Image (cartoon, helix red, strand yellow):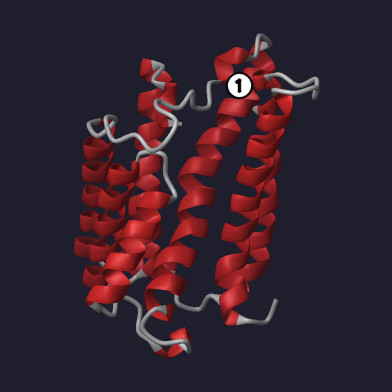
Amino acid sequence: MSSPAFARCAPFVVYMAFIAIEQGLRSLMKGSLPLSESSLLYLYPVKVVTVAILLVVCLKRCDELTFSDFKKLPATLTSIIVGLVVFILWINMDWTFGSGGTPAGYDPYRIQDAGSRTVLIAFRIFGASLVVPLMEELFWRSFLLRYLIKNDFTTVAVGTFTWGSFAAVAVLFGLEHHYIIAGVMAGVAYNLLAVYTRSIAQCVLSHGVTNLVLGIYVLTTGKWQFW
């Protein structure tokens, strides 16, 4: 837990492990496992709570995450604008599928009970707009973007630019998402923001704005493939 790399990587690794578990359960469902697609929706709150608890523990080791950076109003405004631009581009890049075609997405309306559905929606918004941006920015922009420059990454200033690290993180960030090209676009945008603001907190804000607005868009349009 004391390792700087562990503090920035562990929440991301656990989050991805939950995705792997979900995919494994989905594969078993094609066999004899008596589960439905709707039952898998309940895995998301467990994932979000687990990662959120881990983040609380790990943030003690992440001194570069300083929310006082939001006092720099020009940078904060830029972060919000970048987040909105990424959202607009993202919903217009739904033609960039990875393998498997259009994803079914996270559709809480598969659950008939209104109360349970509301809880799932609340967890999804909370996870997408707060937990995921914090977890991903600590991994991609705080850890990997600097680690690819120097193994002792804590000695590398946040936002330090090299072509190799910038390109690698943008591409890998894209490959993490179903919409790969849209993901690369977002990776480039958040990387540029890190270089411009020299702030992980600003990257978290921008990423959170994108995901929050995307969540509102999905709920109002029913385009669950973006979730």
At which x and y percent is residue 74?
Answer: 19, 62
Residue 157 quadrant = bottom left
Residue at image x 44%, y 23%? 224
Say if residue 42 shows up in the picture. no
Q: Residue at x 28, y 75 (%)?
A: 164
Relative horizontal placement of residue 200, taking residue 159 as reference (left or right): right
Residue 38 vs 49, above or below: the answer is above
Q: Nearer the viewer, residue 56 or 88?
A: 88
Amino acid at the residue labelled 1: Thr
72, 164: nearer the viewer: 164
Reading the image, the residue beneath label 1 is: 118
Q: Eyeballing the image, is 66 above or below 152?
A: above
Label 1 SS: helix
Question: Residue 215 in the image: x percent, y percent?
Answer: 42, 31
Furthest toward the front, the residue is 31
Q: Quadrant of residue 10?
A: bottom right
The reply, left or right, for residue 192 in relation to residue 142 is left
Quadrant showing the N terminus: bottom right
Position of 153 compared to 1: left or right? left
Residue name at image x 47 percent, y 57 percent: 136
